[in-house]
Each structure stands twice: as structure tokens, then as C-alpha cells.
Amino acid sequence: QVQLVESGGGLVQAGGSLRLSCAASGRTSRIYGMGWFRQAPGKEREFVGDISRSGATYYADSVKGRFTISRDNAKNTVDLQMNSLKPEDTAVYYCAAALVPGRYEYWGQGTQVTVSS
């Protein structure tokens, strides 16, 4: 089992920045990739970006160039640095862990990010 806890959400004005953090515990040695997803009200959950154990990252087109994912394998944490935030980035952001590539089995409780215009 893997447990994930997100932190760092909040309210920010458009153009501002926020940094989310996700701390993993449990059988962290089995984690291959860690990803961030988000879900806005009335919309389906969508992929934001992910990072492999080796540090390779991949981002959704909607956040590319604005968001950056980093990972500290020693501390079992993954961060999401969000810059140039837009109102459409408003959502609950979830951290997820995959034991095999692309298969996210473990999820955090989510943290709210609200971007005001």
C-alpha cells in the first residue's frame, strides 16, 4: 500500500504562483511514476503531468511551460510548481502514484486550487 498526502493549495490571483507538494508513505520503493491530476467542478478529472523515477517528465499541453514537476526520491515527495496561473486552472488537484508506467493505483485526498480573475 502507498499513502499520498497533498498540501499547498489555496487562493491566488491570475498570473500568480502556487506550489503543491505530495508526500508518499508506505511501500514507496515500488513506486515507478508519480503524477498530478485535476478536476474542475462539473468536469472530468484530467491529467496535468507526471514524473518517472528517473526524473523524466511529461505535461498536458494546457500547462506546458507554466507548470513544473519535480521529485525527491530520498524524501518520497513530488512537487508541482504552478506559475502564470489562469482562472481555468481552478480545480481540485490530486497526486497519484503508479507502480507500473501509466497505471495510477494510489491517490491522495486532493487539494483545492482557486485562481481568481
Image: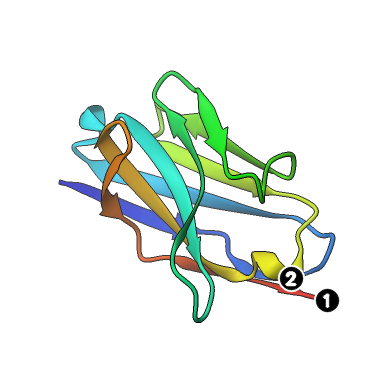
Q: Which residue is mark 2?
A: 87
Q: Position of residue 40 (x, y in %)?
A: 54, 73
Q: Amino acid at mark 2?
A: Pro
Q: Position of residue 34 (x, y in %)?
A: 39, 39
Q: Position of residue 6 (x, y in %)?
A: 44, 57
Q: How is the image coloured?
A: rainbow
Residue 24 lies in what quarter of the image? top left
Picture residue at 39% right of the left edge, 24% below the top: 53
Residue, disc 1 = 117
Task: Give the spatial CA distance, label 2 vs label 1.
Answer: 6 Å
Residue visible at 33% across and 52% down in the picture:
4
Give the residue at x 74% y 45%. Answer: 66
Identify the secondary structure beneath mark 1. Answer: loop
Dot 2 or dot 1: first in sequence order is 2
SS class of the residue under badge 2? helix
Residue type, numbered disc 1: Ser
Residue 27, x across and y down, in percent = 18, 37
Q: Residue at x 21, y 30 (%)?
A: 30
Q: Is residue 31 left or right of residue 77?
A: left
Q: Is residue 115 left or right of residue 55?
A: right
Asked if residue 113 is positioned above or below residue 85 in the image, the reply reads: below
**Are the two marked residues, 2 and 1, in contact with CB atoms closer than 8 angstroms?**
yes
Which residue extends farthest top?
54
Tell me if mark 1 has few (under 14), some (14-19) or many (20+) residues whose alpha carbon lies within 10 angstroms of its own. Answer: few
